[in-house]
Image (cartoon, rainbow, N blue to C red):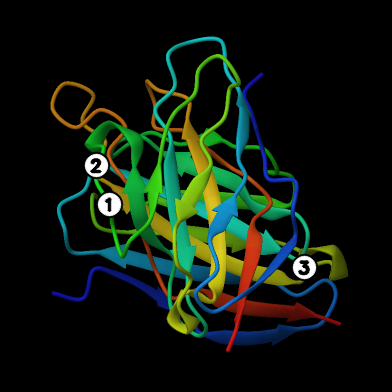
Amino acid sequence: AQRVTQPEKLLSVFKGAPVELKCNYSYSGSPELFWYVQYSRQRLQLLLRHISRESIKGFTADLNKGETSFHLKKPFAQEEDSAMYYCALPSGGYQKVTFGTGTKLQVIP
Amino acid sequence: NAGVTQTPKFQVLKTGQSMTLQCAQDMNHNSMYWYRQDPGMGLRLIYYSASEGTTDKGEVPNGYNVSRLNKREFSLRLESAAPSQTSVYFCASSEGDRALHYNSPLHFGNGTRLTVT
């Protein structure tokens, strides 16, 4: 069965420090992974998807099939990055999406 | 263009009461979902509807029923609420067309905060 693991419930970093939010997955097929973000009092929204290979708000994520990981990275954290981040894995076919348990990023000024 | 709209925003129920959470999307999406969000457990899929006229169970369907009323609307019903159903409920939709938009991203509503006492 597919599974998404986000090992850290809370990650605190100082402003300007690098950020890495970890995501590991278990999936038998060829995965397509997403990162979603939920800012305080806002709805969940897509941050980025690996097939786009784009950088959104300075964040990037690389799919590492060997390590089955899709870690989210940003070189210099900003206070506005403080939010809840979820890694997500669609199963394919019927769009059944499995989410990780989420990591709360706290950027300390 | 409102996106995904959920009602109500807040609700308090007593054990055994019933209620229906409403969700509507105006993006002409094929697929719709209901998730619950609990601390430390992330988002867990309750039910989903890949297309109009179909519904399927997710990870945690017990105690819930759904209706895909039409392409726009997907409701979630709690027939006999229990304290374990205290949670934040999110509705989401996606284009969901396997041929054209395989694994298209989810668009979420603002959530319904439900408390069962």
Q: Is residue B93 above or below residue A71?
A: below
Name the residue tied to disc 3: B81
Name the residue tied to disc 2: B30
Quadrant where the C terminus of chain B sits is: bottom right
> How far is mark 2 from mark 1, CA to CA?
28 Å
Closest to the observer, A38 or B91: A38
> Mark 2 belongs to which amino acid?
Asn
Task: Write down the quadrant of residue B18 in the picture.
Answer: bottom right
Q: Is residue A65 above or below residue B88?
A: above
Residue B27 in percent (x, y) is at: 16, 58
Q: Given the current orientation, which residue lies at the most extreme top position?
A: A28
Q: Is residue B106 visible?
A: no
- Quick check: B34 left or right of B29? right
Q: Chain of mark 3?
A: B
Quadrant where the N terminus of chain B sits is: bottom left
Residue drawn at 63 percent across, 45 percent down: A100
Closest to the observer, B69 or A61: A61
Residue A79 in percent (x, y) is at: 49, 83
Mark 2 or mark 1: which is in front? 1
Secondary-structure class at tag 3: loop
Query: Neighbour class for label 3 at 10 Å: few (<14), some, many (≥20)?
Result: many
Residue drawn at 22 percent across, 42 percent down: B95
Name the residue tied to disc 1: A55
Residue drawn at 38 percent across, 56 percent down: A59
Mark 1 or mark 3: which is in front? 1
> Mark 1 belongs to which amino acid?
Ser
Q: Chain of mark 1?
A: A
Residue B63 in percent (x, y) is at: 74, 52
Query: Neighbour class for label 2 at 10 Å: few (<14), some, many (≥20)?
Result: some
Residue drawn at 59 percent across, 45 percent down: B45
Q: Chain of mark 2?
A: B
Q: Is there one chain holding both mark 2 and mark 1?
A: no
